[in-house]
Image (cartoon, rainbow, N blue to C red):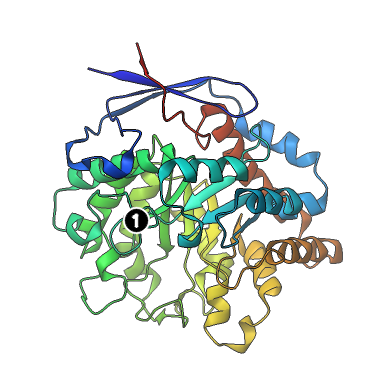
């Protein structure tokens, strides 16, 4: 039996319907998630030509507005008015929710995501790191994580991420940075407990399944391209590196990313890690790794950096300037830059101003910024058309 649940849109007054056999109770914190069915069917609004609409929207923007639109910022607050003011004053294209943004219950979180959405016709990319297990921002997420999914059939990953995506979606969050496509068999690796497989082949099966489960309800993100498994070390405090050849990478660690891309993941997060035989620079700053993702793996979605604050955290002198890191990231091929560690209300604005100044000075091609802004805008417009990222009605009754 399939039931439908109404979704309450924002001020635009547009109504959407989700047809779903997966029902997460309004009081999700008290839900028995083990009993949740996981087949999801979405009946969305008719698909618009988002690419053409994005081009038109970006063409009407100033360079400063384009630059702001490719920044995903963060401030550590649960004050809805402060979050609203932050989004209004910066004009940035996205916001990442961290632990300091998560209130005690789902209803309060919905109020925060509503405050972040200044314009429902162009909703920001509101994101969260909701892997489950070790990296979990939503305390009411009781679905299995990579700690057990790596040893379970791929179908278990599909089910778990379908349920996880429903919780994310119910909170008014459009993007989940939740699918770790790294693979390692080394329990000493910092990424081991978060990886969905201990071999590239097993990880690929579970990554693809996770994207299938999550993708209807939330926008899946694959991370941390091109893969932490082969590069020992923690990129929060260093630049992990490996001398693995491109051919070895393509035959092994590329598998989970290729599988996730083929399954339709719309975002790819670039890690601050170096495969020195391909490019001595971190992948997040490497034009070659962006070419590989698009030309060799066929990725067409939004490329986003891991937190740029991690580059500064490496302690390397060449990464001490956060604005220069952001400009280099966009120049390399990222469509969005993420700022978390050390982020203040001024960080996003300074980052956007630096990107715009680089375009005006000619050190960052205007076409590259425009391309990035168009990809981000296309995803934002898709969210607006489909109702994803809008705040659901927690008290609505099922409809026929």
Image quarter (top left, top right, bottom left or bottom right) of the N terminus: top left
Residue at 52% across, 46% down:
301
Q: Quadrant of residue 224?
A: bottom left
Where is 287 relative to 262, above or below? Answer: below
- Which residue is label 1 attached to? 131
Q: Secondary structure at mark 1?
A: loop
Side (left or right) of 50 relative to 128: right
Where is 259 relative to 192, above or below? Answer: above
Side (left or right) of 117 relative to 132: right
Coordinates of residue 16 in the picture (x, y in percent): 50, 21
Image quarter (top left, top right, bottom left or bottom right) of the C terminus: top left
- Label 1 crowding class (10 Å Cα cut-off): few <14, some 14-19, many 20+? many
Coordinates of residue 37 in the picture (x, y in percent): 21, 32
Residue at 51% across, 28% down:
386
Q: Nearer the viewer, residue 282 or 131?
A: 131
Q: Nearer the viewer, residue 309 or 355?
A: 309
Q: Nearer the viewer, residue 70 or 388?
A: 388
Residue sitting farthest toward the right = 360
Q: Quadrant of residue 335?
A: bottom right
Q: Nearer the viewer, residue 194 or 389?
A: 389
Where is 337 relative to 140, above or below? Answer: below
Coordinates of residue 120 in the picture (x, y in percent): 64, 33
Coordinates of residue 160 in the picture (x, y in percent): 25, 45
Residue at 59% across, 24% down:
48
Residue sitting farthest toward the left = 152
- Whether residue 302 is visible, yes or no, is yes
Side (left or right) of 150 relative to 380: left
- Whether residue 371 is visible, yes or no, is no
Residue sitting farthest toward the top = 400
């Amino acid at each position: 039996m399939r039931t439908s649940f109404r979704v309450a849109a924002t001020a635009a007054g547009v109504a959407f319907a989700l047809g779903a056999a997966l029902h997460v109770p309004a009081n999700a914190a008290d839900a028995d998630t083990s009993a949740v069915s996981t087949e999801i069917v979405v009946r969305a609004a008719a698909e618009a030509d988002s690419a053409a609409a994005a081009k038109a929207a970006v063409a009407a923007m100033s360079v400063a507005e384009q630059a702001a639109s490719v920044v995903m910022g963060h401030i550590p607050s649960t004050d809805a008015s402060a979050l609203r003011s932050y989004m209004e004053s910066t004009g940035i294209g996205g916001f990442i929710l961290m632990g300091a943004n998560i209130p005690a219950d789902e209803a309060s979180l919905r109020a925060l995501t509503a405050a972040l959405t200044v314009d429902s016709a162009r909703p920001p990319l509101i994101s969260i790191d909701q892997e489950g297990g070790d990296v979990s921002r939503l305390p009411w997420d009781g679905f299995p994580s990579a700690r057990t999914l790596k040893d379970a059939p791929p179908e278990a990953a599909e089910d778990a991420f379908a349920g996880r995506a429903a919780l994310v979606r119910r909170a008014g969050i459009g993007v989940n940075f939740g699918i770790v496509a790294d693979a390692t068999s080394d329990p000493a690796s910092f990424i081991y407990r978060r990886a969905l497989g201990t071999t590239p082949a097993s990880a690929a099966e579970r990554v693809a399944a996770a994207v299938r489960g999550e993708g209807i309800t939330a926008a899946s993100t694959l991370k941390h391209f091109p893969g932490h498994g082969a590069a020992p070390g923690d990129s929060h405090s260093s630049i992990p590196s490996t001398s693995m050849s491109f051919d070895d990478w393509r035959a092994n660690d590329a598998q989970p990313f290729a599988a996730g891309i083929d399954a339709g993941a719309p975002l790819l997060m670039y890690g601050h890690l170096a495969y020195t035989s391909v490019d001595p620079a971190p992948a997040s700053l490497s034009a070659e790794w962006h070419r590989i993702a698009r030309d060799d793996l066929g990725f067409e979605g939004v490329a986003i950096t891991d937190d740029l604050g991690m580059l500064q955290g490496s302690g390397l002198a060449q990464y001490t300037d956060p604005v220069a890191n952001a400009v280099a990231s966009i120049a390399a091929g990222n469509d969005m830059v993420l700022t978390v560690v050390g982020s203040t209300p001024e960080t996003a604005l300074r980052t956007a101003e630096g990107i715009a100044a680089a375009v005006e000075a000619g050190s960052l091609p205007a076409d590259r910024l425009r391309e990035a802004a168009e990809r981000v805008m296309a995803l934002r417009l898709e969210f607006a058309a489909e109702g994803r990222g809008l705040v659901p009605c927690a008290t609505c009754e099922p409809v026929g």
